[in-house]
Amino acid sequence: MNQNPKPDYFTLFNLPRRYALDETALGESWRALLSRVHPDTAALADAAVKRQSVEDAAYLNEAYRVLKDPVRRGEYLLQCYDEASTGSHETLPVEFLSEQLDMREAAEEAWQMGDRDRLESLHASLTAAQQQQQKVLAALFVDEAPSMEMLASARQHVLMLQFITRFADDLDEKLNA
Amino acid sequence: MAYSEKVLEHYENPRNVGSFDKAESDVGTGMVGAPACGDVMRLQIKVGKDGVIEDARFKTYGCGSAIASSSLVTEWVKGKTLDEAMAIKNTQIAEELALPPVKIHCSILAEDAIKAAIADYKAKGGAQSHAEETAEAKVCAPHVPTA
């Protein structure tokens, strides 16, 4: 068993600890590391080495998935700075929630009327909203540690991004059904 | 995970779906959401001059348990005073609907929604007939909801 503490995901891929992500660098780094620990390359080794390589590959893949996902990357950064998001029991700005409810209502109506154009335009505004949230997060999580205020704000924006993403995924499913 | 009979019943025949004009002074609006599941809930109360909740409306986008929880709460708050409505606990909602542990957060959301609606109503000055109003008016402290 490996008793050494595992490096954080950013250090693992030799990436700066910020929200804005160089996806190409992440992908390249992931592939390079994986080729070294991939269980297949340890096929001839003894059982302990094999098990270790399976574990390492799993850790690498999880790290890759987390950093690649805009919501999970945000949550991970919050965690890095000891501000774990506490899950479902969180308050969001009333204006934001009202807007989301209105859009849900509009989507439901469009769906019932079979108005595909309307659904696609709603999906487009959700995509724009996702990008906007990501932009804000990129400005909050830069190289140096964020202040308490910035962390509190980041937590809200991660939650909003999560909310919007959930809705966008639902619409995606409907549009591709 | 199968829904209980009561959840299905509320899900298929939700009570009090709709909205009141949130600008009206006798209306309190509570908006809450759960980012992880994308649920969003709006719960509104209409309060009489005697401080009793006359009517309630809700609109919820979410799973069956979230819809059933808000539907149930709109039924429960009618005829209650604000203080009585404040005392509604998520555990009572969860028990009534026989919610499984993974759905408890839906009942918490409904409890938050009713508390938020009451706080909104009070913040609007809807509780003007109450004695505390004069005392509050003299203190220039920021408004802190007691919810």
Image (cartoon, rainbow, N blue to C red):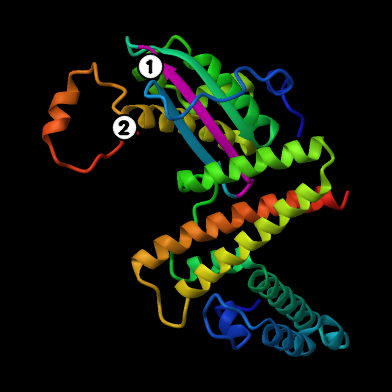
| Up/down of A168 relative to A102, above or below | below
Q: Quadrant of residue B17?
A: top right
The residue wearing badge 1 is B84
Q: Amino acid at mark 2?
A: Ala
Chain for disc number 2:
B
Magenta segment boundaries in residue numbering: B36-48
- Nearest the camera: B23 or B127? B23
Crowding around mark 1 (Cα neighbors within 10 Å: few <14, some 14 to 19, many 20+) is few
| Up/down of A149 relative to A94, above or below | below
Which badge, 1 or 2, is on the more N-terminal residue? 1
Q: Amino acid at mark 1?
A: Glu
State the mark number for residue B123: 2
- Nearest the camera: A62 or B113? B113
Where residue A122 sits in the image (x, y, percent)? 70, 51
Q: Quadrant of residue B98?
A: top right
Say which residue appears at 79% left-offset and 40% top-offset: A111
Would you say A52 lies left or right of A79 here? Answer: right
Would you say B29 lies left or right of B39 here? Answer: left
Magenta region's main secondary structure? strand
Say which residue appears at 70% left-offset and 88% top-offset: A29
- Cα separation, mark 1 vs mark 2, equals 18 Å
Would you say B20 lies left or right of A50 here? Answer: left
| Up/down of B72 relative to A96, above or below | above
Where residue A45 sits in the image (x, y, percent)? 83, 87
Q: Secondary structure at mark 1?
A: helix
Say which residue appears at 39% left-offset and 27% top-offset: B118
Chain for disc number 1:
B
Q: Are marks 1 and 2 in contact (CB under 8 Å)?
A: no
Nearest to viewer (mark 1 / mark 2): 2
Where residue A11 sits in the image (x, y, percent)? 56, 84
Q: Residue furthest left?
A: B138
Q: Is residue B64 visible?
A: yes
